[in-house]
Image: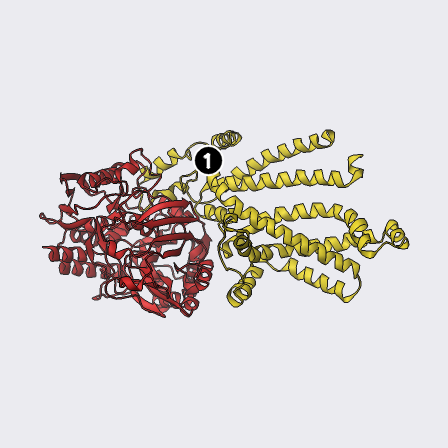
Chain colours: A red, B yellow
Amino acid sequence: MRKSLIAIAAAAALLLSGCAGGNGDPSPGGPPAASEVDRDARLSIGTLSTPATWDAAKNVGGPEPAMLRLVYDTLIEVDENNELVGGAAESWTTEDGGVSYILTLRDDIAFTDGAPLNAEAVKANLDRALTLEDGTLRASLGNVASVDATDEFTVTITQKVPDVTLPVLLTDRAGMVMAPSSFASGEVTRPVGSGEYVWVAESPGVSVTLDRNPDYRDADHVLLAGVDIRAMEDPVARLNAIRTKAVDMTFVGPEQVDEAKALPGISSFDVKGRSLRVIYVNKDLEPAFGDPDVRMALNKAIDREGIANGVLFGAAEPAYQLRPEGGAGFSEAFDSAITYDPEGARELLQKAGYGEGLSFNFVTQPRFQKEAEAIQASYSAIGVDMTIEILPGAGAGTALWYDKTASIGMANFDGRLDIGLAYQTFFVEGTAYNPSNILDEDLIAMIGTQAGLVDPAERQRMHDDMATLIATSPLGAWPVVWGYEPVLYTDEVVGVKPFQTGFPALKGVGKSQ
Amino acid sequence: MLAIFAPRLIRTAAVFVLVTVGIFGLTALLPGDPALALAGENPTPELIASIREQLGLDRPLYEQYFGWLLALFSGDLGTSLYFGVPVGELIIARLPVTLSLTLVAVVISIVLGLAGGMVAAARRGTIVDRLATVLSTIGIATPNFWFGMIFIIVFAFGLGWFPAVGYAPLADGVGPWLAHLILPATALALAGAAELMRQTRSSMTDTLGQDYIRTARAQGLRPAAIYWRRALRNASIPLVTVVAFQVALLLGGVVIVEKIFGLPGLGSLVIDAVFSKDLPVVQGVVLVNAIIVLSLNLLTDFLYTLLNPKVRHG
């Protein structure tokens, strides 16, 4: 039963499998032997920032859930092979084709405040996530109808319509179990969980101190005395920190990759599938974008290989699907009509009646300015006049999705736990990321159908068809490139595995004697 | 003294009010919606509206301004939209880093600037003087972040004398504290030192040309005594203004240096707050900076009055 459940869950599994790179490969197999590691050692990590909030129901996602996972158990976990495995729930099952899921919890887990992690605690967390007025999980849990504590260690989650992606959702913030005492007052001022580490102290935006949880259920995999998280927003500062061993582990940007991987005594692996540059278009503001030939032309004009290798120094790959190559859900049987073909693009624009040219304002974030400039040059070659407008912070997203003042622009997509969720994010009616509702009825039907497919092979075939569809007839969101996140660590750090769930993932990680 | 300072205090208060209008108005012009940044993935318009209402962002701008101003007078700088903690707490946590960096930079700037300026004045017209001019030009023209990167390469990576990133609080010991600050503070200080060197040279040259200095030489006073006891005191009066101006510039210049060296100071805080459109933090940090600069101006006026009898007796 467990194997079939994992097979089902694997079909709905997460982002790419990682591939190791750099001076040394991450460790295969189990955790390092006890004699190899210094159990009193602490690990220093350089991150972008500290979590804005430790409240899983209010956290906005992105890079932060990986830090929350150090403190909180999730009901279901993802291992380094992108397989779903038991977390606080040792098993889960559906007996009605994905309408309801029955989770059996471990009976030996306690929060660090002493309270048991039982069905009532899980229900309290999920009910809160479903009803919190300013919660950030209400949209992703929108299909959950009810949560019941069937017995002391059994939870039944009933959905409105069948959706096999629920177990995947429970590997992230929706599945994080906070001690009910920590949100009894309404606000989580201090995180209390049952995870590998215990939150000790924090200076917001500067540092977080975590100590080992001595009562963690899987103590063999917690090999550090504690973790010290240091926020360093600048990737060059993080590179300098790992170079001088001021931190033991960090990640850098594409501009630093070559230099980082050449550092002596530093190993690395790439986290893929967490940063997709996507172009969004609004046909209501620019009618040309309502013409499929124009959309295809603008896609054919983009040199995705050039951007991946030139702008992002090879720490990226061209994107035609909502998964990087090798990732769970990636379509090998894939037929893309989007090849780099400026001549073909020009012909399509001519056919669509834009032979004299097209012009528009293109909004994006500061971090994508170089990609935008590369696209601008490509478009200029086919007679399209594109002006770049850089909007800091959430400005580009606001203009594209909410204020709807921008007809075209580029913003980041940090992946979805399941590729079916990614399609729902971009291509169904009314979703924020499809601001002018550029729809394809066949695709919408497939999105609905695949959510209820239990057979992994059948689901993958449908994903193959969906990938071919969006690559044959681009809609309102166009994948451009997947950026990698190179994770670096010193040679003192052992037991590192290429988790693709984000940075840091420290299960089985220690420091050598 | 009160007669001298009362008008200055009133002017400072008026400037402060203008500054608050400027701070609030400029941050309100920043593009992007902070409610969207806080709403997470695929939020509904209702959620965004709810967040805006909770944060008071749906009120008219003038209401938001007066609410903010009233809270200021009770010491409340608001709550960080991003971290959910009082802005005052964030600033208090970061202020020691920026003040430490600025303090060490000021000391380095004064030492290098005064020493260089005095040597150049004493050796005016010689190759030493010309070299000092060239060095000061380089110091003024070169961005502090460039110096910072060079120092990291040479002194951190190459020689391993100092750490490349990070900050050690004074509680960890003076040695680690200073070791983490030397490189960034020097990078920050060089432009100011260069400017101070020029001003010192100019001021000392003028002073050394005065009749009373000629008289002191004629009376057989040693050169060192002439420089330190007679010339420097009078030459330093205009330098007080220059140093105060430099401190204000240093406070603004810490932003990039803090980023390069990974220092968790106010500069880093405000840059991150701008990008996450955490308006209360931006307003709070800029306000604190403004208060420090206005206070420095008042202090400079006070010192000037003490040093220059002409001002006192007016």
Please tell me which residue lies in front, A50 or A476. A50
Number of numbered callouts drawn: 1
Residue positioned 13% across, 59% down in the render: A458
Q: Which residue is mark 1?
A: B78
In x, y percent, where is residue A487? Answer: 36, 61
- The one nearer the camera, A245 or B149, is A245
Q: Position of residue A1 (x, y in %)?
A: 9, 55
Q: Amino acid at mark 1?
A: Gly
Is residue A182 shown above or below B232? above
Q: Quadrant of the C terminus of chain A?
A: bottom left
Please give the name of the residue rendered at 9% of the width and 48% of the height, measured from the top-left corner.
A95
Q: Nearer the viewer, residue A396 or A245?
A: A245
In the image, is B280 to the left or to the right of A173?
right
Q: Residues within 10 Å of mark 1 (few under 14, many from 20)?
A: some
Work out whether A285 lies above or below B291: below
Q: A112 or A477, which is in the foreground?
A: A112
Q: Chain of mark 1?
A: B
Looking at the image, can residue A42 be seen?
A: yes
Q: Would residue B104 be found to the left or right of residue B133 on screen?
A: left
Q: Quadrant of residue B197?
A: bottom right
Locate residue A479, reporting x and y percent.
Answer: 32, 59
User: Mark 1: which secondary structure?
Assistant: loop
Residue B178 appears at what percent x and percent y?
A: 56, 54
- For the question of whether residue A380 can be seen, the reply is no
